Amino acid sequence: MGSLYAALEIGTTRTVLAIAEAEAGKRLRMVCHAEIPSSGVRKSQILSIPDATQSIRSVLREIEKKQDSLGSRVTIGNAFLVVSGQHVLATHAEGQTLVGGSRVGPAEMNEAARLARQIPIPKGRELLDIVDQDYALDNRGGLSDPKGMSGNVLKLNTLQIHADANRVQDARSAADGAHLEICEPVFAATCAADAVLEEHERKNGALVLDLGGGSTGYAAYANGYLASAGVIGVGGDHVTNDIAAAFQTTNMQAEELKTSTASAELGTYPAESSRVRVGGVSTLMDSRTISRRALDTVVNARMKETFTIVRETLEEQDLLHHMHAGCVLVGGGANLREVESLAEKELGLSVRRGKPVGIDGLEREKDPWSYAAVAGALIYAYRNDEGRSFLDGILGRFFK
């Protein structure tokens, strides 16, 4: 058996755990994954650690059942934690070093990187990632590789992605209760981007939108690097709540209407499909029908708001016109009918759903884009483990 990696996502609507295996000379392959409805989580925030712990225990049991059915057994001791929610922020940090009129070499570039990584993040925050962007040499900016160039002052621009430390600790505590160690937290949107974007898309500029239950994460690439990232506090649960409020249904009925019938775009409705039946909440209450157009109007309004916030955010950063490779939708919200069409209209970009690349094992999934974040976390774990043989002993202790 090759090296094994695990990724855990404690989302608003579901808790997902996935395992991948890497064999020498072969591609990374997701060998098993499971999901169960989340408990104790709302708007990407853990409200009850005992409930969240129970969700993690349940998904671990699902993994064990699946492994048993395959005739194998893997005991998971640690996992990378996929983090999302509006508490995740991205801020710029700059490392600066003197060149003194000489040519820039590896030493100066390494020193700029070292100084950039020494810049502290705000108190009460936990670092998820530091991403190198571009260099500036004196008054020349936007340099991808200044090696060999002459100048006086070299600067490296980086993007620090960090989260509320207490939120991350709550997730660790919930996992600890299920005897699962969190080895590193990682940002959902950038993980998803790692899973679904090709290198040429990063170079040409691309936007990845992670349409989650409690929030929507984004990662925007321009000129080959991550130019901006963040989270807006609108997600699929807001759509569900809007349906429930508009038509006086339970949240379970509203979720069913959203996933089975509703569309993000308004269309034409033949007489035979212009009404949607809603079952009674009990055997004592009769079912009723609601207007399909009215249902889609509610969904369209909330999704239009979501894409408008994203568009305005990127326009403020002067980035939207750099997204030449378009937008890629991932997450559970990407399953919504006609969501690609609406996103194209509101963002002014070509839009597609994102199937993970660089990892096998999701070929038979009907909605592989909903696993993009955990797939990206597994890819991240694998890439960071390559060439570090000392981890073999650590993994040996955690995976049996």
Image (cartoon, rainbow, N blue to C red):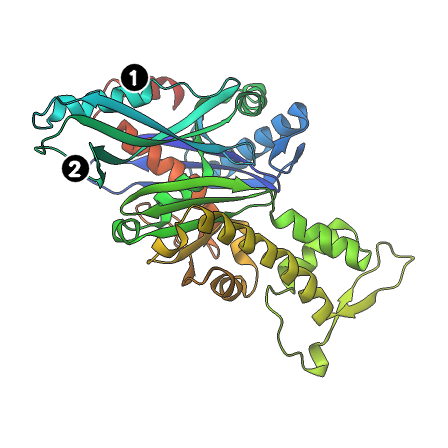
Would you place residue 272 above or below residue 163 in this image?
below
Please provide percent x and percent y for residue 18.
45, 37
Residue situated in front as seen by the camera: 293 or 67: 293
Query: Number of marks in the image?
Result: 2
**Circle 2 is placed at which residue position?**
145
Q: Residue at x 54, y 55 (%)?
A: 307
Would you place residue 300 above or below residue 34 in this image?
below
The quadrant of the image that shows the N terminus is: top left
N-term mark: 2 or 1: 2
Residue situated in front as seen by the camera: 333 or 71: 333
Residue situated in front as seen by the camera: 38 or 203: 203
**Circle 1 is placed at which residue position?**
393
In this picture, residue 145 sits left or right of residue 285: left
Q: Can the viewer see residue 77 in this picture?
A: no
The quadrant of the image that shows the C terminus is: top left
Would you place residue 26 above or below residue 385 in this image?
below
Q: Secondary structure at mark 2?
A: loop
In this picture, residue 291 sits left or right of residue 393: right
Please provide percent x and percent y for residue 363.
39, 54
Please provide percent x and percent y for residue 71.
42, 38
Amino acid carrying label 2: it is Asp
* Occupied quadrant, residue 93: top left
Please provide percent x and percent y for residue 33.
47, 41
Amino acid carrying label 1: it is Gly
